[in-house]
Structure formats: structure tokens, C-alpha cells
Image: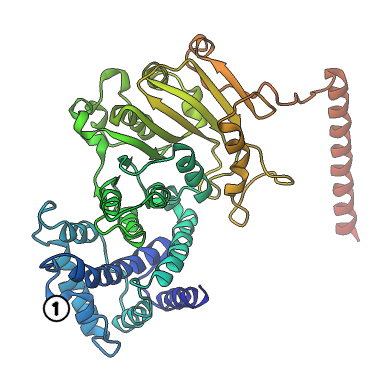
Amino acid sequence: MSNLSGIIKSIRDIMRQDAGVDGDAQRISQMVWMLFLKVFSDKEEEWELTIDNYKSPIPARLQWSNWAADEEGMTGDELLDFVNNELFETLKNLDVVPKTDPQGWIVKQVFEDTYNYMKSGTLIRQVINKINQIDFNSSSDRHLFNDIYENMLKELQSAGSSGEYYTPRAVTQFMVDMTAPQIGESVLDPACGTGGFLTCAIEHVRTQLNNPSDIQTLQESFQGVEKKPLPHMLATTNLMLHGMDVPVIRHDNLLVRPYDSWGPKDQVDIILSNPPFGGTEEEGTDANFPPKFKTKETADLFMALIMRLLKDNGRAAVVLPDGTLFGEGVKTRIKEELLSKCNLHTLVRLPNGVFNPYTSIKTNLLFFTKGQPTKEVWYFEHPYPAGAKSYNKGKPINIKEFDLEKAWWHNREENEYAWRVPVEEIVARNYNLDIKNPHAPETALGDPNELLAQLQQTAQRVKALQQEIVNALEESLLS
């Protein structure tokens, strides 16, 4: 780990010297298109042995092994001109068809909205030489690099709005563990960001593999969709690092397709997702949805779509903000649809700060199964660990904290964290799901007269202190 960490640190230090790379998001984007080509090159060595008559979709001169692998190769202005005007120009415009050339289609999708930010060909060569020290065909290098890559994605939390791409690993792991995807089940994340839910689910299913045909089944079971170019590239590379030969990560926005056009052939067994919340879709997107679901709010549209894309008996785990729970209008109609068409069996309420520093908004994990109406909703209020009052970058939420929920999950009883609410009560509340923990100790507000007297005393003390400061200033000016 230390050697790989040192390589990544060296790459960062080199990039900081380049005038064209501005901020974490650009630095990671720059690093990842190079990593992608190196991972793809190492994969091609494997495919040449495992795929009959394999032919690279990348022209020979542009293949990593022919321009990047030689540490004494192109550099300076020659390399910069090659990258900007030949490499990117060709890869963005590859003439490939997804069904007949899936590897080529991946390359084209990754590069169509990717840019080279570096302005020094000499520094590009230095970065490339560092990347060449990593062997992605070595299982030890690959597994160690996965951890480093995870940390790189986590860094995007502090890179402005890019933080929306990363869901804390403990949250994704818990949602996957409780949804428990099985070999052969189709798994979708319709707003996959950097691919955290998919990689967690892949590793969960990988433990179930028993024979070679299972490996092929695994390869065909996972798909993600991401509309923004940077996370799309990050997700594609992420899945390749987790052993997916041809990751199905579509560079697309499912919300622009008419709601009624989604049929049984599009439906999946499991959906795991953290749809972007707080955002709005472009003008006209809501026209693709039935009148009862028409809204510009991204999370609401995704919630309606997720219910549509689940098969009967399909399972979902979705992250949603508090605003969805108590919101009215379209939100009410979406919750009515959810409770009438699905069994919302569990709602885990997370405390403040789980998504710090990206957002302090309180979030919730909704677990539901399609096909039967909800009869009751079990709530579980996730507590902070002992001694903590919030989470931060240095002390994020930990998967071990979810042992509380896991111990309770299959043997449910009400306790200080868990309670259940009949659906009739929720309907009577106009589908307001923002229901507080009835077992939480009430905060005593105190006697109003006593509180007023204390307030007056405090105000008098503040006034006296202000006068002391004024007196001290006057004395200093006169002396």
C-alpha cells in the first residue's frame, strides 16, 4: 500500500506544478483518464488470451503500450500535441457500435466529454511514467489500488458540487448488505455517480461464485447510468478495477425518456441509489412524466422512475432527504404511490452530518419491495457513536455502527431506536413520513416565568459588559 500511495502522491505533486490543472476535481479527472487507458491496456493483455481473435478498438499508434509505456518516449511539446490533437480527437470519435464492439464503445463514452487539462508535455510524461509503475493485472496491486481509488473518490466530497458523486462507504455497504443481491439478479443504479453502490454489490455477489458460468452471469448483472461526464468516467474505471470487463455504465439521463415507455424488459430485480437531491432538471423534463408526478425536482422524478423500473417482488434501497418525508404536493402523490404499490418495510433515519462536508442535510434510507401495499413502516433512528455529536471528514460514519440495525433487522421489536407506524396513521397524516421517535426522551423546556427571568438577567449582564467596554475605551482615549 505504501508504494502505491507514494506513486499517487508523486502524481499529485507533479500535477500541482502544471498551470492547467485547477483544483481537486480537475486533478482527479486528469489522473483518471490516464489511469483508465492504463487499466484498459492491462485488460487488453488479458483479453488477447481469453477472447478469440480479439482486436483492439484503439488504433495501434494510440494504444497505451505504443506511446506511453516507454519512459523515454514522447515528451514535451510533441507529447502535448499528440494528446490534444490526435489521442483525444480520435478516441472521442471512434466509429463503434455497442453490440458489436462493447470495449470500443466504453472508450468512446469515457472520452467524449473528457479533457486534457495539463499544459506541459514534460509533466504529462512524468505522470505517465509514475502510472506505468502500477500493474493492474497483478491482483495485489489491483486490490491495494481499489482502496486508494476509493479515497480519491472520497476527496471529491470537498471538491465543490462534485461531492454529490460520493456516498459514504458505510452507507452503501449497509444498504447492499440489507438488500442482499444474489447471483443472477439484475442490479441497477439509475444515478450511479462514481459507482459506489455497484462496486459494493459486485463484491457482495462475488462471494457467491461457484463455477465459470457464474463469472459471466456476474459480468452481465450490473448496470448504472450517469449523466455527468466526470463521475461517468470515474464509475467506468471503478467497475473495471473491480473486475468488470465491460462495465455497463451508460452516459445518459433516464429522466429524459417518457415514463410510459419503460416496460417489463427494462425492469430489474434490485435498485440501489442515492439520487441527487436539492437539484432541478432542465425545462421540459417533467413533461415525460404523468401529470401526478410532474415536477422539476430531480430526487422526486427519480423516485417515481425507480418504482416504475422495479420488477414485481423487486427490492430497492434509496437515500432521500428529510424534505421528501414531510413534503407535500407532488411529494405526497409519490409517497401515496410508494405505499400503495410497494411495501415500505423499513425507514432508517440517519443523523446530521453523515454527508459532511458536502451537505449537512439529514437523510433517510428507504427499503421497499414492489408488488404488495404497505401495511406498516418500521422506523429505526440511527444514533451517533458514544461521545460523538456529529460526523466529519476525519471521523466519518463507520459500518460497525450499523451492527445495531443488523441485529434488529430479522427480529424486530420496538426499542429506544425502533418503532412501527401503521399505514393508516401515515395516510391520516396526508402521507407525511416525518414521524419522530416516540421513545426519545423529551427535552424539558422549563417553566416559562423562570426562563423569562433568566433571559432578563442575561440581558442585564450583557448590557453591563457593554458599558464596561465603553468605559474602558473612553479611559484609554483620554489617557
Residue at the front extreme of this rendering: 211
Q: Position of residue 313 (x, y in %)?
A: 35, 26
Q: Residues within 10 Å of mark 1 (few under 14, many from 20)?
A: few
- Going by the image, does 196 lie left or right of 35? right
Which residue is nearer to you in this view: 460 or 36? 36
Say which quadrant the C terminus sits in.
bottom right
Q: Position of residue 465 (x, y in %)?
A: 87, 43
Residue at the bottom extreme of this rendering: 72
Q: Position of residue 236 (x, y in %)?
A: 30, 56
Helix, strand or loop for disc 1: helix
Q: Residue at x 51, y 43 (%)?
A: 174
Q: Which residue is mark 1?
A: 61
Kindly identify the amino acid type of the residue bearing the numbered disc 1. Arg
436 is higher (above) or lower (below) than 161 = above
290 is higher (above) or lower (below) than 239 = above
- Going by the image, does 59 lie left or right of 449? left
Which residue is nearer to you in this view: 67 or 28? 67
Q: What's the colour scheme?
A: rainbow
Q: Residue at x 50, y 56 (%)?
A: 158
| Residue 262 seen in the current view | no
| Residue 188 seen in the current view | yes
Mark count? 1
Q: Residue at x 38, y 76 (%)?
A: 134
Say which quarter of the image contains residue 403: top right
Say which quarter of the image contains residue 333: top left
10 is higher (above) or lower (below) than 161 = below
Q: Position of residue 319 (x, y in %)?
A: 46, 36
Say which quarter of the image contains residue 40: bottom left
Which residue is nearer to you in this view: 191 or 285? 191
